[in-house]
Amino acid sequence: GQNIDQPTEMTATEGAIVQINCTYQTSGFNGLFWYQQHAGEAPTFLSYNVLDGLEEKGRFSSFLSRSKGYSYLLLKELQMKDSASYLCAVRDGDYKLSFGAGTTVTVRA
Amino acid sequence: IAGITQAPTSQILAAGRRMTLRCTQDMRHNAMYWYRQDLGLGLRLIHYSNTAGTTGKGEVPDGYSVSRANTDDFPLTLASAVPSQTSVYFCASSDGTSGNEQFFGPGTRLTVL
């Protein structure tokens, strides 16, 4: 089976930085995805890592260490619109995605 | 149509009734997926299809069936709904190749009483 862990909730102040950690144990690995999901809406793609290292995309960055089964999503210069759930998902050897339960980030003014 | 659509948006259903959730994509993606999302459990894969004419079971397939007669459509059927199937259902698609993300439909909120 798949085991993907991420914190349930995080709170941060507007303009600050927040790091959301994700650890995983899966049967096979073909990449790790981060999705953003606003309340009542569909998940939308944020980032994809398949090799070790940091991928930067504007205010959002994602890091992967395959040997440690670890990833993080870094959100910089937080804005109120970043209040959402952030989903870590691992693609296994059969190219199916397994999702963590999600981290709800609340940005305070 | 732009992207991936689902119907209905929401539905209240009596236990024991049959229900089909519809999903259509116009991106010519090979792969399609059905997930359910429950509070505290995240998204769980119900069934998937890597290409038209083929389907496979995900993590929680019991009580659900799917078909993939063509590239665009991937309906999910609950043969005899039970209250534990109350959930938000998301359909997704991808072109199936390495590195490509899944695109999600807007979801169907289903309540089984």
Image: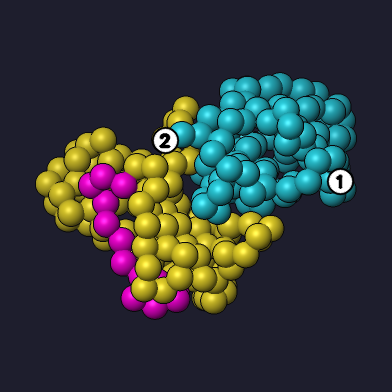
Chain colours: A cyan, B yellow
In depth, the one of B97 and B22 nearer the eye is B97
Q: Amino acid at mark 1?
A: Glu
Residue A101 in view (yes/no): no
* Residue at image point 85% right, 35% down: A76
Q: Which residue is mark 2?
A: B38
In depth, the one of B71 and B21 nearer the eye is B71
Q: Residue B2 at what x, y percent from top left?
A: 57, 73
Q: Which residue is mark 1?
A: A56
Please, what secondary structure does the residue beneath circle 2 have?
A: strand
Q: Residue A46 at what x, y percent from top left?
A: 71, 48
Q: Quadrant of residue B44?
A: top left
Q: Is residue B24 left or right of residue A93?
A: left
Protein chain holding label 1:
A
Instruction: Say if the magenta span includes residue B42.
Output: no
Q: Residue A16 at what x, y percent from top left?
A: 86, 27
* Residue at image point 56% right, 46% down: A92
Q: CA distance from mark 2 to mark 1?
A: 31 Å
Protein chain holding label 2:
B
Q: Is residue B91 above or below residue B26?
A: above
Q: Amino acid at mark 2?
A: Asp
Q: Which residues are magenta?
A: B61-73
